Amino acid sequence: MRETFYAWGHWEKRFSAKKKRDEWHFVDMTADGPGRYFYAADGAHPAADHRATSVMAWWKRPAIFMPSAASRILLEVTDVRVERLQDISDADARAEGARECDPVSGREVLLAGPSQRGSFVLHYRDLWERINGPGSWAANPWVWVVEFRREASP
């Protein structure tokens, strides 16, 4: 799993034959220096001095550039399938982070007992429309369902 992180290193210019010009490239020296990465999600990060690009320092790096050695969460894909959006089950909606909603009012159910169970799908529908726009739930598109399990960290 990739995430925004801080790496110890410096920037250097390299010639790109494809683009026929010099480009800046980050040289990650974390393994040779401090030996550990810091993660933006943890809130605490090392002080960084970014006044000069070639200085060895801690640099904030986007998740797309995270090396596998820096990953602290490993996921194993266990199933992939295609289904219609509205075919989502309550269990799958809950796994997506939806909260339980009352089927009549559509409001979140707080401290619901077994006799007054609500629907996770209702909340998931609302989340879907907030992200993808009005009418996106009614369109009932085909979606990829990717199931995974978390492996032990290295």
Image (cartoon, helix red, strand yellow):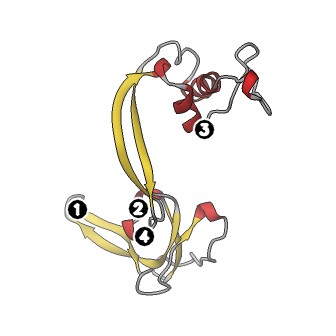
Q: Tell me: residue 54, above or below residue 3.
A: below
Question: Viewer-nearest of labels 4 and 2?
Answer: 4
Residue farthest toward the left in the current orientation of the protein? 17
Q: Which residue type does callout 2 highlight?
A: Phe
Image position, residue 14 (x, y; %): 29, 72
| Residue 53 visible in the shown view | yes
Q: Which residue type does callout 1 highlight?
A: Lys
Tell me the SS state at disc 3: loop
Which of the two labelled residues, at mark 2 and mark 1, occupies the earlier sequence position? 1
Q: CA distance from mark 2 to mark 3?
A: 27 Å
State the mark number for residue 77: none
Question: Viewer-nearest of labels 2 and 1?
Answer: 2
Tell me the SS state at disc 4: loop
Numbered marks: total? 4
Q: Which residue is mark 1?
A: 20
| Residue 1 visible in the shown view | no
Residue farthest toward the right in the current orientation of the protein? 111
Who's the residue at 49% across and 24% down the image? 88
Image quadrant in which the C terminus is located:
bottom left
Front residue of 115/3: it is 115
Asked where in the image residue 65 lies, by quadrant, the reply is bottom left
Who's the residue at 59% across and 63% down the image? 40
Q: CA distance from mark 2 to mark 1?
A: 23 Å
Q: Which residue is mark 4?
A: 154
Question: Viewer-nearest of labels 1 and 3?
Answer: 3
Disc 4 vs disc 1: Cβ atoms closer than 8 Å? Answer: no
